[in-house]
Amino acid sequence: MRTYLDHNATTPLRAEARAAMFAAMDVVGNPSSVHAEGRGAKGLVERARAQVAALVGCKVSQVIFTGSATEAAALAVAQKARHGGVFAALPTEHDCLRVWSEQDLPSLHDRAGHLAPDWRAALPDGLVAVSAANSETGIMLPGGQVAGSGKGHSVICDITQVAGKVPVVYEDETPSYAILSAHKLGGPKGVGALINFTAADPEPILRGGGQEMNRRSGTENLVGIAGFGAAAEAAARDVAEGRWDEVARLRDLLETTLATVSKKTIFVGKGVARLPNTSCILTEGWKGETQVMQMDLAGFAISAGSACSSGKVKASNVLRAMGYDEAQAASAIRVSLGPETTEEDVSRFADAWAAKLERHAQRAA
């Protein structure tokens, strides 16, 4: 029996999203067409836009549909000329933002995951990427807040892991831009959104037909967008009903159980604000890549860091930036639970992991 524990990489498709996508497949019109069929398709896009806006707490007009959070990040970074002309990303940011960085910045978090009290002062002027939650460790900003733009700097906030797991709560100021992706909250792959909190429309990087109100050209992925909207609405309902509280309990149970097996194992970020489903488990001397393969053979899907590196497994840049050395960073795995994860799943995983650890220790002796 397979058990999926890699929800931060991608989530199972929600039933609500599947139903909305099937229904959208029967809608013939192009959303840009003015006839009845086109208006029907346009209506589906606008319904989804409102559903995403409700999830993240923004105006409907501020939602721009893209092909992914990666594209949304690129579109946001392309606006840097309006924000001082320079873009910088923290070393703990996702690669879709970090790859564009023009400055080397220090991590705002120490090894334990504590945020520097003067972290705002460490941000340079210009456009800066500051995640609401890290996808590898689950560590969030204090109170789970979405970072807002401040004096001298404008913020792109990655809310991909936050949206649909915890309430989206903004600081006194909103960021200039936020990015998110459908497949991280039970929607389909291949559709994301940029939330534009600025007064001006972003300068498009994809030009052509002027779709998305001239902000992102290309015929809208009607089926994907419909699924995104339905997933966003269902995810918001889960958050409101407290479904992730049980997930957090199971995450804590997993960590407590593993801690009784291995006294040297570190749970990165334990004791600070984290996503309710995420455990970054570091067992020095036992490579994360090896653990992923062994647990895969045992029937469990987990990961070693971000899943967005074309299948490459390498020492975590996030953990290195936080102060862990190369060997330690290469010994981490990420277990990320979902609302459908059961206590039995957690118990079976803990038993399997403990058995693999014992074999590793015997071989290393």
Image (cartoon, rainbow, N blue to C red):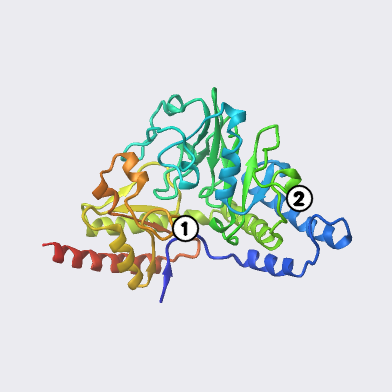
Mark 2 secondary-structure assignment: loop
Residue 242 versus residue 114 in the image, above or below: below
**For mark 1, does the 10 Å Cα neighbourhood hold few (<14), some (14 to 19), or many (20 or more) residues?**
some
Q: Does 79 appear above or below 24?
A: above
Please provide percent x and percent y for residue 299.
37, 72
Q: Locate residue 152, reporting x and y percent.
A: 54, 23
**Can residue 181 be seen at all in this image of the molecule?**
yes
Whether residue 270 can be seen here: no
Q: Nearer the viewer, residue 68 or 227?
A: 68
Q: Amino acid at mark 2?
A: Gly
- Disc 2 packing (10 Å; few <14; some 14–19; many ≥20): few
Disc on res. 171? none
Determine which residue is flagged by label 2: 209
Residue type at mark 1? Ala
166 or 37: nearer the viewer: 37
Q: Is residue 294 left or right of residue 276?
A: left
Residue 9 circle label = 1
In the drawing, does residue 363 fall left or right of residue 307?
left
Residue lying at 58% horizontally and 33% vertically, measured from the top left: 80
